[in-house]
Image (cartoon, rainbow, N blue to C red):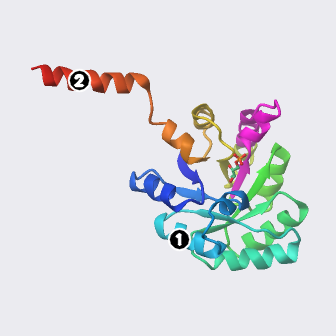
């Protein structure tokens, strides 16, 4: 399973990349807006691409086909690793088809049903982003969606990768990995939680104190 960091924060991205754990990054307008002081969107994306040599999703802000395509083409020129992130709308799907035909990778975001994922895959998306946590938030099992999408993509041999998004806790990652999802895009806080277990801390403390007693 590939690990992406769901962040536009360069310090966080640097730290995870330095551990050799980073396969890519996803950003969205909310995450970029949090990076105060670094106003220019293209600069933020360029800096992220300097750190991570894998796919970096950059989302368009336009909502109509022509502007989405224009913005997507501009974003794709920032770096060869940029993946254009488009919303799951009719115009977004038209733009997905258009940009994919030009060999530009597209990540279709805000996927909440398997039919949305199927449409995105048919349009040529390189990635679909099912938002698991936001479904769980409204008492709908988000992981069932990953299961459904995975079955459908296997049935028809779609090359589109399942990029599990809106991850809230380590269990989401375990469940997504057990279902064979291609990628988990993980917030920094949750990625750090993956390292921890109290028995690891207790065990290490005991080893060191035993050693010092000798
Ligand atoms: C995915 O690409 C999105 O950036 C992200 O996972 C959304 O997560 P949220 O529901 O925690 O905002």
* Residue at mark 1 to residue at mark 2: CA–CA distance: 42 Å
Q: Which mark is residue 11?
A: none
Q: Residues within 10 Å of mark 2 (few under 14, many from 20)?
A: few
Check the image and name the residue furthest to the left.
Answer: 214
The residue at which mark 2 appears reads as: 207
The structure residue drawn at horizontal position 66% and vertical position 72%, both measured from the top left corner, is: 41
Q: Foreground residue, 55 or 158?
A: 55
Residue 55 position (above or below residue 47): above
Q: Residues within 10 Å of mark 1 (few under 14, many from 20)?
A: few
Query: Is residue 196 rendered to the left or right of residue 190?
Result: left
SS at mark 1 in the image: helix
Q: Which residues are magenta?
A: 127-150
| Image quarter of residue 180 | top right
Residue 51 position (above or below residue 162): below
| Image quarter of residue 200 | top left
| Image quarter of residue 103 | bottom right
SS at mark 2 in the image: helix
The residue at which mark 1 appears reads as: 47
Q: Foreground residue, 42 or 33?
A: 33
Residue 66 x %, y %: 86, 77
* One can see residue 50 in this view: yes
Check the image and name the residue furthest to the front.
Answer: 37
Q: Main secondary structure of the magenta part?
A: helix
Residue 213 x %, y %: 13, 19
Q: Which quadrant: the C terminus?
A: top left
């Amino acid at each position: 399973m590939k690990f992406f960091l769901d962040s536009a924060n360069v310090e966080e991205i640097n730290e995870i990349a330095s551990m050799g754990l980073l396969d890519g990054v996803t950003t969205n307008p909310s995450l970029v807006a949090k990076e105060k002081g670094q106003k220019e969107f293209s600069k933020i994306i360029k800096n992220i691409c300097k750190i991570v040599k894998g796919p970096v999703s950059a989302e368009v802000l336009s909502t109509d086909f022509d502007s989405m395509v224009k913005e997507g083409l501009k974003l794709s020129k920032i770096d060869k690793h940029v993946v254009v992130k488009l919303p799951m709308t009719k115009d977004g799907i038209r733009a997905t088809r258009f940009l994919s035909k030009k060999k530009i990778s597209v990540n279709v975001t805000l996927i909440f049903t398997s039919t949305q994922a199927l449409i995105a895959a048919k349009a040529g998306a390189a990635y679909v982003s099912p938002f698991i946590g936001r479904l769980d938030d409204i008492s709908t099992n988000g992981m069932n969606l990953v299961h459904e999408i995975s079955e459908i993509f296997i049935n028809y041999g779609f090359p589109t990768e399942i990029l599990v998004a809106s991850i809230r806790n380590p269990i989401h990652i375990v469940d997504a990995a057990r279902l064979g999802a291609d990628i988990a895009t993980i917030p920094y806080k949750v990625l750090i939680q993956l390292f921890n277990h109290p028995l690891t801390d207790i065990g290490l403390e005991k080893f060191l104190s035993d050693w010092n007693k000798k």
